[in-house]
Image (spheres, helix red, strand yellow):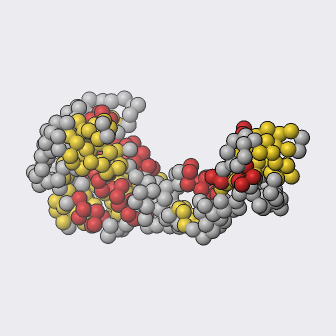
Amino acid sequence: MEHGVQPERALELAMRCPLRRSFRAIDLGSARNRVLSHSLKSLVDDPRFDNSAMDGFAVKATDCIAPKAQLRIVGTSQAGAEPSLGISAGEACRIMTGAPLPEGADAIVMVEDTEVTGDTVSINGPARMGYIRRRAENLSIGQEALPTGALLSSACIALAGTMGHGTVRVIQKPKIAILSTGDELVQPGARLEAGQIYESNSHALASLVEAMGCEAIRHESANDSLNELRATLDTLSDYDAILTSGGVSMGEWDLVRRIMEEEGKIYFWRMRLRPGGPPLFGTWRGTPLFGLPGNPVSSLVVFHVLVAPWIAKSLGYHEEMGPRLSHRVSVTLEEDIPGAPGKLCLRRIRIRSEGGRLLATTHTHQGSGNMHSMVAHNGLTLLPPDTDGRKGETIEAMWLL
Ligand code: AMP
Ligand code: MG
């Protein structure tokens, strides 16, 4: 077991037990927010044929140089029609948006710039080649346009459809169990007795797990009893991973750490992180287990710094297009923000864009039990160990989504 590891080392160790990656095919209609397990190539050219970007007339540009040129209308090209029409010099063909360009035409005049009398059209505006959408100008057949690990947004789904894919292969959502621990915890909505508090971590962690493309299975919180904890962890060991919160510090009642030490396998305990120092990673009956801190802010911070990247790496998420919870940005500090000795320091900051820069300030106090501070702020500093942030300085930060 390693003790007090840097965040990069923590991820490296956790990657010794990655989530298993499997996939299945699903209809495009239910693919939103799923993650592609295989890249998608276009099955067609896009566009499939030269066509018009406007309703109007397909013409020869050289016929339209003289003001108010008069051209003979020889037919109509409609969307969905076979491209069998053609024009010769002095002729025009009515054309609808998306309809195939008739043979011989090299420009389009918008309908608004024309006037029809019988079978003659007067060209009163420009004939533009730019109104023609050329075959394969967007995508060529066989071209890869959606990479492995991309989160399927509405636009991605439309593109998959454009490329001819009615079904797509997506990553099977791993099932991640979430268990909070502590005698003091009561589910929100229930009655509190003296000394009890509302349990919030499992709800936050479940939503983060879901946002990272996995299925969250929240379990009733376990009391601080070795027997209860053992029995509960055993019931959870069939899931793909377990996240616990609480019980990983130095205290006598920090039973997750104790039971993992005595009966599980620990890869590391404690990270060089503030807040979020106490976590551990290991396996329980072979299932990867993150023991996250009980302090609500700490458990979230550790999820952002460690668990989210572990999920993304395990499942092969695309770095830019995959599911993510934050963007790495450079921010200019509007005040001094102290770092932490020997630890990566994640102070909560409010990031706003002003004058082409991202500015960062702090608002509420930064206690690791103060969940309100995670809502009042929208980012976390990434101050390296032993480094204070000075007013006016530009530092790296995570902008939370
Ligand atoms: P622990 O790590 O178990 O010592 O817990 C640290 C602090 O976090 C204590 O104040 C706990 O009451 C609190 N805490 C632990 N688990 C939760 C939870 N699931 N929801 C809200 N607060 C918690
Ligand atoms: Mg506890």
Which of the two residues, 248 or 128, is positioned nearer the viewer here?
128
Instruction: Answer above or below: position of 326 versus 22.
Output: above
Instruction: Kindly tell me whether residue 81 is visible in this rendering.
Output: yes
Percent position of residue 127, x then y: 69, 48
Name which residue lies at 59% across and 54% down: 157
Percent position of residue 186, x then y: 34, 37
Which of the two residues, 332 or 55, is positioned nearer the viewer here?
55
Q: In terms of image quadrants, where is residue 2? A: bottom left
Instruction: Answer above or below: position of 57 versus 360.
Output: below
Could you tell me which quadrant the C terminus lies in?
Answer: top left
Instruction: Kindly tell me whether residue 164 is visible in this rendering.
Output: no
> Residue most toward the right?
118
> Residue most toward the front?
66
Percent position of residue 362, x then y: 22, 35
Which of the two residues, 325 or 284, is positioned nearer the viewer here?
325
Q: Is residue 33 left or right of residue 106?
A: left
Name which residue lies at 23% across and 32% down: 363
Q: How many marks?
A: 0
Which of the two residues, 84 or 114, is positioned nearer the viewer here?
114
Q: In terms of image quadrants, where is residue 281? A: bottom left
Q: Is residue 382 left or right of residue 149?
A: left
Name which residue lies at 24% across and 54% down: 279
Percent position of residue 84, x then y: 83, 61
Name which residue lies at 70% across and 49% down: 65
Could you tell me which quadrant the N terminus lies in?
Answer: bottom left
Q: Is residue 239 left or right of residue 51?
A: left
